[in-house]
Each structure stands twice: as C-alpha cells, then as structure tokens.
Image: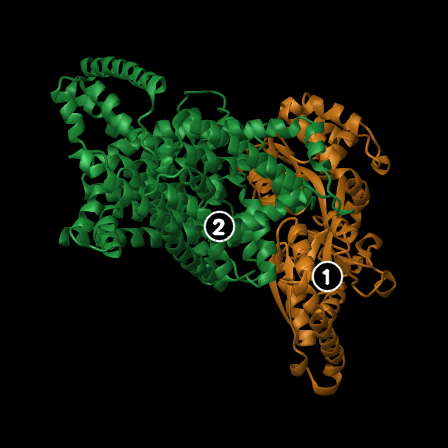
Amino acid sequence: MSAVAAPSQARETRAFRFGALWLAVPGLLFLAVFFVWPVAQLLGLSLFDPDSGKPSIATYQRIAATDVYLRVLGITFRIAGYTALYSLLIGYPLAYWLSRLPDMYRGRMLLFVMVPFWTSYLVKTFAWMIVLGRSGIINSLAMGSGVVDQPLPLLHNEFGVMVGMVHAMVPLAVMTMLPVMAGIDRRLVQAAQTLGASPAHAFWLVYFKLSLPGVAAAGLLVFISSLGFFIVPAFLGGRRETMLAQLIITQVQELLNWPFAGALAAMMLAAALISCWVYDRVFGISTIAGGAAQVGTGRIRDLGLAILAVLARIAGTLSRLAQTLLGRRGSGLILPAFAWLVIGFLVLPTLLVIPLAFTSSQFLEFPPPGYGLTWFRTYFESPLWIQATIRSFLVAFATAIAATAIGGFTALALANSRTRWSGLIFAFFLAPMIVPRIVIAVGLFYLFARIGLVATDLGLIIGHTVLAIPFTLVTMAAVLKGYDQRLDQAAATLGANRLKTLTGVTIPLVKGGLVAAFLFAFITSFDELTIAIFISGGVKTTLPKQMWDDMILQLNPTLAAVSVVVFVVVTVMLLLAERFRSSSSSAS
Amino acid sequence: MTSSMMNKPNRRHLLQLAGGVAAGAMLAPALIGRASAATQIIVADPGGPFGPAFRKAFYDPFEKATGNKVVNVAREAEPTAQFKAMVETKSYTWDVCTLTLSARDILAGQGLLDPIGFTHADVPKLMPEAISPLFMGTDVYSTVFAYRTDRVKTAPASWADFFNVEKFPGRRALRKNPIDTLEQALLADGVPLDKLYPLDVDRAFKVLDKIKPHVAVWWTGGAQSTQLLQSGEVDMLPGWNARLQAAIDGGTPAKIVWNQGLYSIEGWALPKGGPKAEVSRQFVRFCSDPKAQALFTEILAYGPTNLDAYQTIPAERAKVLPTSPENLKQMTIADEAWWSANRAKVSERFNSWLLT
C-alpha cells in the first residue's frame, strides 16, 4: 500500500509546495517595501560620516570605546529574559486552566486575561506606581496592618520593572499558548493513564510535551517584544534599569545623532538575531515555524524526555503531598485558585483606573479625595479626544484585517512547504519584532514623507501592519502546525477546489487561531505609540499619541477617564463578537 | 534623485507664489480687509497646560488682530528629529514650533531654521538671552528644588543642604540626566553661581558619588516629578519650577527653593523653507508683546521674557515666576553652548556611572 502511494504523493507535494509558497509573496513584497527598505536606509546611516558623506566606522569605534553600551545591552537581555521566564511560569497554568474550561465560559474568562491589553501602557504604568509606591496601596496595607514597619522597596528597582513588564506580557504568553493547548487531543492523556501512567507522568510526558510548540512560541514572542520596552523601565525602574531602546530614542530625539542611533540599532539587531539562532539550536525554531516535524533526533530528544520524566516524578510527589495535606478536593482547587490569582494580578491596574477616572482631584491619587464627572466631561467635550478615539478604532480594525490576511496566507504557505527556504522566510517575517520600533518609525517617516503618506490614516495602517504581521504569523503558524493537512487532502479528493477547501475546511477549523490573530493585530495597533508619534503628526492623532501629548508635561485624570471609556466600548465589542461566534458555531 | 531634480523648478515656482501671496497678505488688511488675507498656520507648543495658556495669551488675540487662523498641536519633548525630517523632506507639518535653547542650537547648527525677521532693537524690553536671529523666547523655566514641608523638618535653603543627607534627612530624587544634575553637584560643592561654566566634570562626579546611595528615585519626565512630589514618594527633588508648582497648586504641602536655580528659555522658531513663513514671522513678533505674555502666567507658572509684562501681573503670582526680579537675581542661565559641545560625551559617562 505505502509502496504504491508514496511516489504519487511525493509528486503531488512538490507541485503543491510550489503553489503554496506563492501565498507568501504579497507579505514578502509588503515587508520589503515598508520594512526592509526604510530600516536599511537608517542602518546605512551608521556607516557614513555625516559631515563628509564618506564611509566610516567611527560610530562603531565609539561603541567599542566604552563598555556602557554593551552593559546596557546585557541589562536589556537580562530583563527581557526574566520577563519571558516569569510570563511563561505564570501564564502556563492559566492557559492550561483556560483550555480545560467549556467553550462559552472560556471566552468570558479570556476577556479578563485580555484586560491589560485594553488599558494603555502609559496608564497601566502609572497605576503600578500607585500600587507599589512608598505610600502606595500595598505599603499602606502592610504598614497599617503592622506586617512591616518600614515601607517595602517595591518601586524604582528591578522588581518594579518586572511587575510592569510581566503584567504587560502574560496576556501575550497565554494567547500564544492557548490555541496550541486547545488543539491537543485529551484522549491521548486518558490513553496514557489507561496504559498505566500516573497522572503526573501522563501530564508531563504527553500533554506538556504536546504543548511545547506553544510554550516555545510564547517564550520567543515575549522575549523579543520585551527587548524594545522603554516606558516601563523609565517609570518603574531605578538607576540601573536602563534599556537599549531608551538610549536609541535619546540619540534620535534629543541628540539628533542618527548615525549613532543606527549603530546602536544595528548592535541590538545583531544581538537579537544571534539569540534567535541560539533559540533555534536549543528549542528548534521549527516548533514555532510549524515547519519540519519536531521529533528531535537521538540524544537531545532522549535528554528532553529524561528531564520531563524527572519533572513528572517531582510533580507526582508534590501532588501526593498536596492531596494528603488538603484532601482530594482541596488539592483540586490549587489550579483554579492560582488562575484566579493571576487574573486578579492582570485586572488590578485597570480596576484601579476606574475610581481614578471619577476623581475630583487634579492628580492620579488613590484613594480619590472625592468623586465627580469632571474628567469625563473634559473627554467628551473635546473633539480632539473623540476624533483620536475614532481614528484609533478604525486604524486598528483595518490593521487587523490586513495583518491577519498576510500572516494567515504566509503561515499557510509555510505549513505546506518543506523547503529550506521556509525557515528563512519565517525568520524574515519575524524581523519587525526584533528591530526596535523607533528605528522602524523613523525609517517609515522618511519614506512616507516622500510619498505623501505622513499624517494619513493609510500611513498609520501600513506602519501598524508591519508591526502586527509577526504576531499574526506566529499565532497562525502554531495553529496550523497542529492542523491535520490530510483533511484538506480529503476535501480535495472529494472534489473541492483549492478555494473551496480553504473556505469550507481550513478556515472553519482554524477559526480560533484566526480570531486570536485578529485580536493580536488589533491590540498591537490600538496601543501603538512609537509609530504614531512620527506618522500621525499634526492634527491627525491616535488615542495613545493624544494621551502621550497630554502627559508629557502634566498628568491628569483625563487619561483614566479615557481608559474607562475605551474599556467599556471594547468589552461590549468583545462580548458581541463572542456571542456572534458561539451562536454561529452552534448554528452550524 | 531624478524626482527631486524634477521637483525643483516646481518648488521654486511654488515658493515664488507663496512669496507673492505673503506679500499680498501683508498689504491686504489695509486694502481689502481681513477676510482675503486669512492664512492658517499650524504651531507646535509643548502640549499639556501650554495649549490653553498659549491659546488665551497668543493664539486667540493673534487671530483677532490679524484675521489669520492658528491651529495648535502638541510637539514632542525634544522635537529635533521631526524637525530635521520635516525640513529635509519638505513636508511641513508645523509652521512654527517651540524649542528649548539646546534644541535651537542643535537645529541651528545643522542649518534647519529660518530667521525670525526682527532683532532685540525692535523689542528692547525682551531679555537679551531670549532673542537671536533664529529664535524668540516666550517663556523662562527654571530648574530648582522643592521639599515636602510635612516631612522635612529643617528647611533646606541651598544645593549644599540638598546634598547634605545627615543634616537634612529624607528621601531624595534626582533627574536621570547629566544636564542640571552636574551643575547641582558643583553648586553643592561650593562653586559660585557665576563661575559654574565650563563645568568641572570630574569634580561633579566626585560629589555625585557621595550622594548616589541616598538617591531613591531617578526621574525622567516632567509629569513624573509632579507625581513624585505630590504622592510623597520622595521628600525632596529637583525639577522644573512649573511642574513642582503644579503639585503645590493642587494642595501638596511643599515649598520651592529658588536660591541657586538655573533657568533656561523656550521659544518660537521656524523650520527652514516653510511655506507660510511671512505669517509665521508676524505671529512670532506678536508673541513678544508684554500684555500677551502676562496672560499665559495666569495658567502657567513660567516667566515672561518681556519684563514689561510684570506691570500687569499681580504681585502674588509674580512670586512663583522665574523672571520676577526677586527670583531672577538668585539664579543664573544654564550654558547651552557648553552642553552642546559636551553633551554626548558627558551623557555617555553619566550613563556609565549610573550602572556602576
């Protein structure tokens, strides 16, 4: 049977592969024009002397002359690494818990997880200052109850930065892992137990191993997104928490030294690419790319299995211990309790913003000295704020459609192709995440100024789509990896053409992934500030840009009021979408 | 390359046209009234409280007096990058923009500014530092320090007191930037106000070494300094006077120490080759008016550059403004020329120092 089938199947795969890779071409062209070209131009500046215009490596000599830039690079990587680690440790149990909930209930719980996304970075950061500060909420409670007699140092140090960054990144980690977990066939775990594995062994050696592609994807996404942070370390960090993006921004905006900024960007880019390469060696980038099967060869695989077995044994002992201490019912509550704790952590800053929005004070102080509607009035009476809100929604919607389409087709192309090009193409599509946004933003500003796209909505949509494509691609690739392509082949055998297979079989089956990708892209655009600062100049601003302008010099509770309005609107939108999704799926 | 060469004749043509329109605009009010002369200019101010303050003091009165329209947008804290890209690509998002002296020097050095078209002789009561061929200062801000009166028992009165952690205990913040911070260290070490520049960088770092372990917070933005003082996160900190004043005006028990302050100036400049330069110049000139300048001090605690403005400013308000005679004599102007020449190198050293 197999001897007969194999040759014809191989021929068909080759033909399909050729056809499939074409699906990546629109995305490749888009990124070539709106990402590679502007960034290359900016990096090119670092190789020329600004005065004479001659080739020069002076900027790189300057980096080498002191250790400060390398040290900041080291700090940046350390902070991003810890952020990824903690986000996975906190996010995995939450994602696992979510994946086991019934569909309806899970959709609602996901809204809670996404809450931090709908609260602007700027507002979240200030909320954490109110929670963690010397006379902040935690310290007031701890001192008031007599637990401590000195305020705890929670802010303006690495702890503060970690809280802010992990809080911002846990939703990303959960959203990346969840589709993979939801796609795991639970009967495999049951089968393992039927065959005599302990629950712990069945979990670690079967379930956990199957969820690893999602874990690896989440780790890389969080790590790389964390490299470019600049608001959180500036406000929650102390003397030592300086990240490279801050230095690049200073060079561009304050010192106007673009060649040196280009050199720093090049250094960051090189370091990020090297760490991706190392990541590939250790975890296999294929786990993210949805490419070649991840059945590792020989020793590494054995080592991995051995580690998992040890973990299983430890976990088994721990769970037995928990059961004897808490009883069967009590130990069953550990996971939900942990999940609810994490959800509490995620929604805390947003909950805090609500009373702040109704404050009568001119400051973001907690508890508010009195309540009123002053700041909502300021918001609703200002055409600038309202226009910015509407523009942000429209731009984010258009971005989400464009980025999901490009990311989805590219993921499809890569999933159906087995050439060595697919790894390269995948890395190329991830590149917009690795390059600091400020570099993309300045490069795009240059490009757009010449073709008249500055201060236009189209310019913003293009810029945001560049940033969102990696997220949509990774999400879709992770889903398609677990997707059984024989279903497509079956449809084809039954006479469906390629379009019909796509709309009738593939899309309905990966709907969860599509929704996740769409939401990722929407969020990326909706809370995007760096590109907006450059592209939406003049009177056409987006909401984060308007908030930023408003808070450069003076922080006032309008920001909190805006956050509450956005939060309400988005929650209603999401509930409607969820309702629509569940009713359409039950109808079909 | 080709496209820019092809554009050139067009551009020149446009400029001639613009010049013609502008010349017409100057004559027009006298001949045919305002309506036909109406031009809309986009001005970039620092945003936040500046918007309403400048609207009241400058934009509305200018619209009323000339019939032109002023649209104001907020600019970045350091808009040099946008400015450079704007001029080099000739896509003028703004016609006039406020700059700090350091931004002015960087942009002037790269030839990105147009002349404002009048001199000190035209407005003799303007502070001499506030006007140059490419720039007219509108407001003076001052870097001073404030302390919480409810927490700091012995009132500090100088930078030496601020740096003396034994005699004046309390949590401190400093700005995460060498600018102003080095000056403060030198003043604390006894360098007289008039002999600060050129800064003795080595000596400054030696003084900073001693206070480093006692600095709880390193702030980066003006809004943050208000928040730190208002929330009680720190007990004393240096900052820009109006940001500290905002906390005090909002009821925070704190006091500003003007002694040994460093002031600097913010003001209007024009991007080189802007299409509405004539009306923009008219606008800049309009903003030198003392009565107009007096109006913004009602909202903003910054000092007018035309000292005649104090004839109409109430005495109580004058006390919290940097250019009132009482405050001005205790301070000196920060030397932007020294910083322009040394900023890159000193910033590098400061960043390195922070990490160790």
Tag in front: 2 or 1: 2
Q: Position of residue A69 (x, y in %)?
A: 64, 30
Name the element at disc 2. Answer: helix
Whether residue A302 is visible: yes
Per the rendering, the mark at residue B270 is: 1
Name the element at disc 1. Answer: strand
Q: Judge left or right: residue A104 versus residue B107.
A: left
Letter of the orange chain: B
Q: Is residue B326 above or below residue A538?
A: above
Q: Residues within 10 Å of mark 1 (few under 14, many from 20)?
A: many
Q: Is residue A468 above or below residue B38?
A: above
Q: Judge left or right: residue A3 versus residue A445.
A: left
Q: Position of residue B253 (x, y in %)?
A: 59, 39
User: What kind of residue is marked 2?
Assistant: Leu
Whether residue B156 is visible: no
State whether discs 2 and 1 lie on one chain: no
Farthest bottom residue in view: B32
CA distance for labels 2 and 1:
36 Å
Residue depicted at x 19% and y 22%: A330
Q: Judge left or right: residue A156 versus residue A410.
A: right
Residue depicted at x 28% and y 39%: A179
Disc 1 chain ID: B
Residue depicted at x 54% and y 39%: A230
Letter of the green chain: A
Per the rendering, the mark at residue B50 is: none
Q: Could you say which quadrant of the image residue B58 lies in?
A: bottom right
Q: Provide the residue designation for mark 2.
A: A31
Q: Looking at the picture, tell me which residue is in the foreground, A576 or A140.
A: A576
Q: Is residue B109 above or below residue A103?
A: below
Q: Position of residue A579 (x, y in %)?
A: 22, 52
